Amino acid sequence: MASFFSKAEVTSSGRPVLLRSEVECHLLSSVDLEPEDHHYFSPLKSGLFILTTHRLLWLPSSSTVTHTSAAAIPLAAVSHIFSSKKSLKSMFHSPRIRFQVLVSLDGRLFDPGSGSGSSSGSGSRSVVVTAVVRGKGDCDGFLEKFWDSWRGRAWESNETSGSVSGSGSGTGGGLYSTDGSVRMVGVAGILRKEQEMWESTDKSLQEAFQDLNALMSKAKEMVMLAEKMRQKLLSGTNSQTSGSNDEDMGSKEEIQDWLLSVGIISPVTKESAGALYHQQLSRQLADFVRTPLNRAGGMINLIDAYCLFNRARGTELISPDDMLQACSLWEKFDVPVMLRKFDSGVMVIQNKSHSDEEVFARIRSLATKPEALRSGISPSDAAMTLGIAPALAKEHLLTAESKGLLCRDVSPDGFHFYINLFPEIDPCDLFLVKDYGICHTWIKAVSTSGLR
């Protein structure tokens, strides 16, 4: 399979990595790819079949998707698409989508991007590939979009859309127009004038829609440019040396904040994903939240993630129920993020590598400072130390309290937390104070401030 098909890269959550200006069009589940001649490749069983504007992608249905198991068929290699035939026999077997691809003389799939073969596919042979749809899905809708994507030829970057220019009507006076035809007068002239007005309006609408299409095309180019810049910034941050100054780091973080709001090039929609909408949305969300999580210290509020994700999706907004269902599906997939719910009901998204023990150690270090021993720490103090929102800092403090690390004091000024001194008190001798430990440090801090 690896020698026949083109390479298809996937993300850590199993989503395909799209090419430049590539957009998903339709998905089908449980699809087998079978060649007419098994000499070229072995059949691929039960995978996810994705149609984009540039390629046909086949991903295995298992949770562990690797670069070698994912296959791609460029639409440029497709030479013919067979129409579906409705017959009595087709009612008793799974729907099939048959298409013909070009194969080079060395047995590889024709790929114009790799330089194998000419642009017209000369010196190649044809192979018929059959996609057998075992699962539920709109097979006719997939075939229709397959035709549209293949005829659209979006992979040809040098394609230019021509503008249709109509010839204007004659403006000369008299009985005859400039082209020599007799000018209409009377009732016929009024009807002709009305028709010309409607044609002019229709032309103006067409030009307006052409401007909108051009604007959308430019917007897509800007999104791709921003995504490329963001990837370059992220790779530069990872390979950065310790000698970089804070000013450069601040400017890069500011640019990353701006690029984060530009958007997702190909958001998953119910129209394109169908029955697999929540599964693919869950995988795309897992890929999206990695950058905000890394910048937020490994944990982000679910509401904040929902706002960021919807802002990146543009007009393809999702509901809170879809967001919650997509997050709940992470337990079934091998993704590096998870949904967590605190005892108070607050839900957050965090990395699986996030450690509460590390957070508790930082809270303990903050709570044992002399000032904190005298007046305690508030959620705002913990938020500044941990670099997170005060609401999340309060949840960490409450969790530390449930573990016996802190004690809570509720006053008109709000919540204040103190280090727990009770584990160091000897029940047999309550007045015994050791010369070491947190209790001794607390007594010294209180004595210094003049409070007893």
Image (cartoon, rainbow, N blue to C red):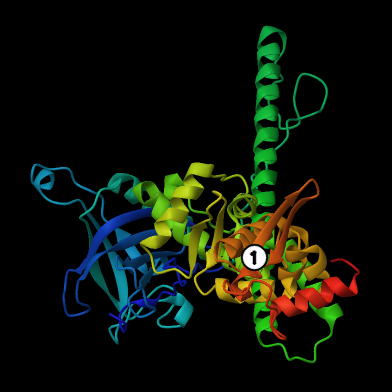
Q: Is residue 179 left or right of residue 302?
A: right
The residue drawn where x is 59% and y is 58% is 264
Given the image, on which type of amino acid does mark 1 rest? Leu
**Can I make out residue 154 in this image?**
no
Between 313 and 239, the one lying in front of the other is 239
Q: Toward the viewer: 333 or 5?
A: 333
Q: Please rate how many residues cluster around mark 1, counting C-alpha atoms within 10 Å: few if below 14, some from 14 to 19, many from 20.
A: many
Q: Position of residue 53 (x, y in %)?
A: 47, 59
Residue carrying label 1 = 406
Q: Quadrant of residue 63?
A: bottom left
The answer to whether residue 61 is above or below residue 434 is above
* Rendered residue at 41%/68% (across/down): 14
Residue 275 in the figure: left or right of residue 222: left
Looking at the image, residue 150 lies above or below residue 253: above
Judged left or right of residue 244, residue 398 is: left
Task: State which quadrant residue 68 falls in.
Answer: bottom left
Q: Position of residue 168 (x, y in %)?
A: 73, 35
Q: Position of residue 23 (x, y in %)?
A: 50, 58
